[in-house]
Image: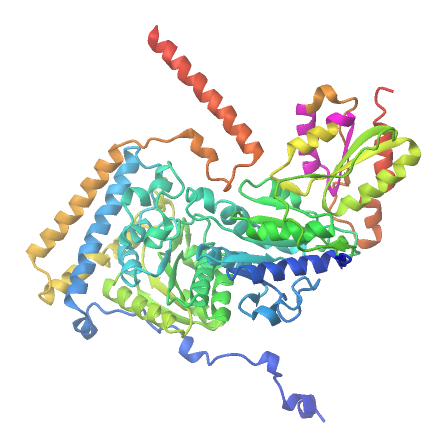
Amino acid sequence: MTVLDHPAAQTWPPDAHAPRRDPAPLLPDAEPVRILGTPALGGLDPELLRELYRRLVAGRRYNQQATTLTKQGSLAVYPSSTGQEACQVAAATALRPTDWLFPSYRDTLAVVSRGVDPVEALTLLRGNAHSGYDPYQHRVAPLSTPLATQAPHAVGLAHAARLRGDDTVALALVGDGGTSEGDFHEALNFAGVLNAPVVFLVQNNGYAISVPLAKQSVAPTLAHKAVGYGIQGRLVDGNDAAAMHTVLTEAVAHARSGQGPVLVEAVTYRLEAHTNADDAGRYRTPDEVAAWQRHDPLPLLERELRALGLLGDEEVAQAAAEAEALAARMRAMFHVKPELDPMSLFTHVYAEPTPQLREQAAQLAAELAAEAEAQQEAAAR
Amino acid sequence: MTTLAPPATATMAQALNTALRDSLRADPTVHVLGEDVGTLGGVFRITDGLAAEFGADRCLDTPLAEAGILGTAVGMAMYGLRPVVEMQFDAFAYPAFEQLVSHVARMRNRTAGRMPLPITIRIPYGGGIGGVEHHSDSSEAYYAHTPGLHVVTPGTVGDAYGLLRAAIASDDPVVFLEPKRLYWSKADFTPDAPVPTLGKAVVRRPLSPGGGSPATLLTYGPSLPLCLEAAEAARAEGWDLSVVDLRSLVPFDDETVFEAVRATGRAVVVHESAGFAGVGAEIAARVSERCFHHLAAPVLRVTGFDIPYPPPMLERHHLPSVDRILDAVARLQWEQ
C-alpha cells in the first residue's frame, strides 16, 4: 500500500484547503490591450474620444507648467507624469463621482482630473500643507508618499462602502516600484479575501527612480501578480488613452458588480526624470527615451482621431487654448504666496490638543509676539 | 427597603470583552477586526462571542498581515466606521508600524482635521507570562514618541473596561496596550461606572498621615499591582509610598503627577520596558523640570534592562521586582 492508497488521500484536499478558483480567467491579456489603430476604436463614443484628447492636452500642459514652477521656486519639487497622461486622465474618467481615488505622489494630474483645484492638489509639493484639498469633496484621498501604503486604505474603504450598502468603487494608483512593497501584496490579498470592490492600477513606467523593472520583478508581467491572489489581472497599453479608459471602465464595472477586485497594469513610460531633482541621464539612454517619444500618448491619439475625422485643426487649437488657459491660471494662482499661520501647527494633531501641546503653542505664540514687537521697533527706528 | 446587588467579580479579560460588546451594541459603526478574533474569540478570548452576536462582518477574521489589517482599518475609518484592531501580541504589531506612524497618526493633521481616524489598536503587551520571543515586548515608548497617537494602558479591571470604552469613543487613534499578565487578575466590576476621561492619572494609594517617610511611585499598566505590593512592603521599612497610576501616557497628566511628587519630594518611576530612552526618562525629566525645588533626591527609575526581552526562564531577573523597587526607595535617602 502506498500513501496514495491510504483512505485519507481519497478525500484530499480537506475542506479547509479547498477554496480556489480556476486561474485561467484571472490571467492577464497576452499582449497589452490596444484600441488605437484597431477596429475597436470605431465602437467608442466620439465625444468621449474628443474629451480624452482635450484632457491629454491639458494634462501635458499641466505637467510642463508644474515643472516650470519648480524652476521658478514656486514648487519645492515636482514628479512629472509627462508620458503617463493617458493613465492619469483615465483614472479619473473611469470613475463615478461617488467612487474614490487613492493617488500616490506622482498622480496629481489624476487628482486634478477628478476636479480638485490645481493649487490645492499641489500643496504637498509646494510645501505649504500636506493635503490642500478636502478628501470628501471630490472623494480623493490625500496623496500618499510612502509607496503602496494607500492600497490597503482603498481596500478598507471599498469594504466599508459595501458593508454600508453603497456601490462605491475605490481605485488605488501604484507605480512599478510600489509593487515590491509588502503593503501592495497585503492589499491584493485582503481585497481578494474580502471580495472588496477595488481596482489597483499599476502605472509601470519602467523605473523606480533609477532601478529598472528588470531589477524590480521577474514576474512575466506585473499584472500576473494578481493571479496568485485570486483576482483578475489586466494588461493594457498605458499610452493608449482609449484602451486605458476602456480597460479601467471595465475593471471598475467588474468590481462594482461584486465580481471581485482587478489589478490593471498599464505599460507606459516616464518621459521626464523621477523629479526635477533627478538626473535620468545616469541610468537610461537617449535612444530609449526617443523610442518612447515615438509612442507618446498625445500624438498617438491625435493621429488616430484626425484619421477618423473626429478631430480637426479647429478642435486641436481649441484644446491647446484650453490647456494654455489652465497654465495661465496656475501661474496666476502660484504667483500669490500663501499666508500661513504658524499657530496652525498645533491645531490638528488631536481633536483636543494635549496639555503638552497647549504649553508648546503658548511658547510659540510668545516667540511670535516677541518677533512682531522687534519688527515694530525696527520699523519705528 | 432596597437591597444593593453585590458587585460582580470579573477578570480583566472579561472586562475588556464586555467593553467591546457594549461598544458594538451602542454604536453600529464599531467594527472589530484582526487575526483569530472571530470564531476563536482571539488567542486571549478577548473577542469571545462577538462574532456570534454581531456577525462576521462586525467581528472580522482577517488574513494574517498586520499592515494589511491596520491599513484596511484606515480605509474603513475614512468611510465613517470606527474600527477596533487586535494585534494579537506586542511584537507582532511591528509590521503595522509604518501604517501607524505614517498614516494613522498623521491623517487628521495631513488633512487639517477633515479626515480624523477613530481607530483603536488593541495590543496585548508586556511580559511575565513566560512567553517565547516576540510575545513579551513593552512597546509603549515607540507609540508615545509618535505625535498624533493616544497611548493608554489600564492597570485595573475597572479601567480595562472604562478606558477601552473611552478609547473606542475617541475621535482620534488610540493605541490601547493591554497588560497581558493582568488578563486573569480579578476584581469587583461594575460596567455602568462612569467612563474615565483619557489623559487623567489617578492616585491608587494615597499617603497616610504619619505613615512614615513619604515618596511617590509613578507607574502604569502591568507594573501597577507590583508597585502597590511594594508600597505595602515598604511600610515595614518606615516608608509611606503613594502610588500614581498614569493610565494614559499620551496625553500625559502632568498635574496629578507633579502634585503627588511635590507632596513627597521623592519619586521613583517604575515600568518594565527598557529604561534607556523609555517613558520613565520622559517622566523623570518632566518632574525634574517642574518640581526641582520640591525634590529632596533625584528622580529614580526602576525598569527592565536595556536588552531584547529575555527568554522565559530568565525573565524574572529582567523584570522590576518588589525588592528592586524597595532598593530604589532606600536610595532616595539622598540628604539624610
Note whether A192 is above or below A275 in the view shown: below
Against A315, is B210 above or below? above
Give the image location of residue A107, x and y in percent: 34, 51
Of the 4 image quadrants, the one containing the N terminus of chain B is: bottom right
Looking at the image, residue B89 lies above or below residue A344: below
Picture residue at 57% right of the left edge, 41% below the top: B146
Please indicate whether residue A214 sits to the left or right of residue B252 in the image.
Answer: left
Q: Which residues are magenta?
A: B262-290
**Residue located farthest toward the right when viewing the structure as drawn:** B236
Q: B99 or B57: nearer the eye?
A: B57
Q: Quadrant of residue A345?
A: top left
The picture places residue B219, in percent across and down from the top left corner, at 74, 39
Give percent across and percent down for residue A308.
11, 67
- Where in the figure is residue B138, as x and y percent of width and height? 70, 47
Q: Does any portion of residue B224 appear in the rendered image?
A: yes
One can see residue A182 in this view: no
